[in-house]
Amino acid sequence: MLKNTELGNILFLDIETVPQKPSYEELDERFKKLWDKKVEHLRKSEEETSSNLYPRAGIYAEFGKIVCISVGYFHNSTLRITSFYSHDEEQLLLDFSKMLNNHFTGGSYLLCAHNGKEFDFPYIARRMIINKIELPVLLDIAGKKPWEINHLDTMELWKFGDFKNYTSLDLLTAIFGIPSPKDDINGADVWKVYWQENDLERIKTYCQKDVISLAQLMKAYRIEPLILDDDIVYV
């Protein structure tokens, strides 16, 4: 099946998310109470509090926000990489939506992410609705049957029907001899790099590395040569 999919029709993407506020203490009272309730299901020891667990808020669309979406697509043999990143989530999402609506609306196009069906795709859709942005066709899946949804998930593809295990992108890149995308920071560091270091450029670079790894992994799944550095273009 993967061999029959035109690589040029796949949009590889990755998102980076952070808590909506720098700290728990800066939440308003309503959201403090709501986070307290959420933490009841997250806490594993008495030492874990609403405050020190707040850095994890970014993984929940209700408590977090998107600060970067990086995408990649093949044009002939070249992988073209671009990013939408900003402190202004609404503008970031509007720009991303405009790109999808202008260039990825046909029925043959697919979105691809690692664990995208559980995280990236629903997170983007939820944040778009919160920001009152109409969903692009590729994210508007309400009422569609599973085979009508144009989403690929490199983690799901690796399962081959085995639903017991989570396999990280970092592990899969190691298996296939692909350079690690985690050579600088990892997902757990993003909130600190954003809120404490104010370094969006560093987050963008990290996000782009994940997208390149996704595309490389897809090439490995198809038993095709990996992408050369000279064939990666940033636009």
Image (cartoon, rainbow, N blue to C red):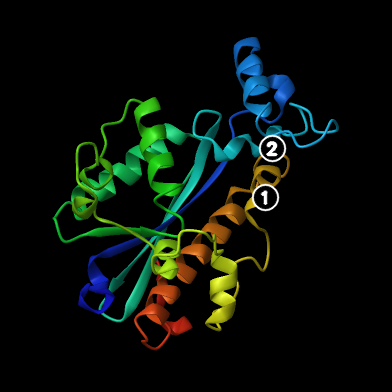
Circles 1 and 2, Cβ within 8 Å, touching? The answer is: yes
* Quadrant of the image containing the N terminus: bottom left
Residue under circle 2?
55
Q: Residue at x 19, y 49 (%)?
A: 102
Which quadrant does the C terminus fall into? bottom left
Q: Which percent across, then down, holds residue 173?
A: 54, 75
Q: Is residue 180 above or below residue 228?
A: above
Of 78 and 211, nearer the camera is: 211
- Horizontally, is 143 left or right of 97 in the view? left
Q: Amino acid at mark 1?
A: Ala
Q: Position of residue 79 (x, y in %)?
A: 36, 73
Q: Is residue 119 left or right of residue 21?
A: left
Say which quarter of the image contains residue 202.
bottom right
Residues 83 and 45: in front is 45
Q: Residue 31: give x, y in percent of width and height.
A: 60, 17
Farthest residue, direction bottom:
225
**What type is the residue that disc 2 sits on?**
Pro
Q: Nearer the viewer, residue 163 or 227?
A: 163
Foreground residue, 5 or 23?
5
Residue for badge 1:
188
Q: Residue furthest top?
A: 29
